[in-house]
Amino acid sequence: MLNLGEVTYLDSGGLGTLIRLLGRLRFTRGDLKICQVSPSVMKVLDLTNLLNVFHPHSSEREAIEAFSHRPQTPRETFGAASHRIVCLDSSLELLAFMRVLLQRSGYDVFTTQYLSDALNIAKSKVSPTTLVILGPGVPSKETAIEKFRESLPNLKVLHLPADFSTSDADQAGSELVNRVRSLLVPTGK
């Protein structure tokens, strides 16, 4: 249980940390309950479409009682994916933030810290990748873009600004989803 009552600011890196923590806990059959969420953090969770992931509680008691309820499975939490996206960055927190945010928006998302893994996932013949997102922590983005263009000339590549992980999580998340949607709009529409 995590009391966020005194947290007044949450950037995308902090939100990514919460998402990673939740993922680790659920992987080991645990869970994370948050409570006494300040209005500014509640706004971030709402604008990033993560209220249904974290299910904030008004009090510590309510959060503790919620542990007796079954947590949602990923299938219940996330909808069917329409596009495959690969996210590459050095920050696990940022990758967790992007994965959950984009999955909640209906995308099939793979994250990695390694360019070679990103290339292998993107080249999969079973389920072709539509978009690759390069985070601010990707060293030599030009080299990464070159490698993707050599292997997959029609692949769309989006690179995030250097301040993405320190921006307001709600604004950064909203802008990311909007940019992804605009890049993935079918031609002719």
Image (tube, rainbow, N blue to C red):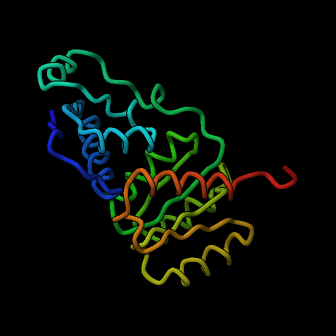
The image position of residue 84, as x and y in percent, is 61, 50
Q: Is residue 101 left or right of residue 69?
A: right
Q: Is residue 4 above or below residue 16?
A: above
Foreground pick, 118 / 96 = 96
Q: Which residue appears farthest toward the front when viewing the image?
A: 39
Q: Residue at 58% x, 44% y: name it.
A: 107
Q: Position of residue 67 (x, y in %)?
A: 20, 21
Left or right: residue 135 compared with residue 22: right
Q: How many marks?
A: 0
**Residue positioned most to the left:** 61
State the quadrant of the N terminus: top left
Residue 82 appears in which quarter of the rendering?
A: top right
Q: Nearer the viewer, residue 49 or 82?
A: 49
Foreground residue among 126 and 87: 87
Expressed as whole percent of the image width and height from the top left, the position of residue 124 reads 63, 57
Identity of the residue drawn at 29% across and 48% down: 20
Which residue shows up at 47% across the image and 25% down it? 76
| Residue at horizontal 43 percent and vertical 72 percent from the top | 136
Residue 179, image quadrant: bottom right
The x, y position of residue 86, in whole percent, is 54, 58
Relative side of 182 to 165, left or right: right
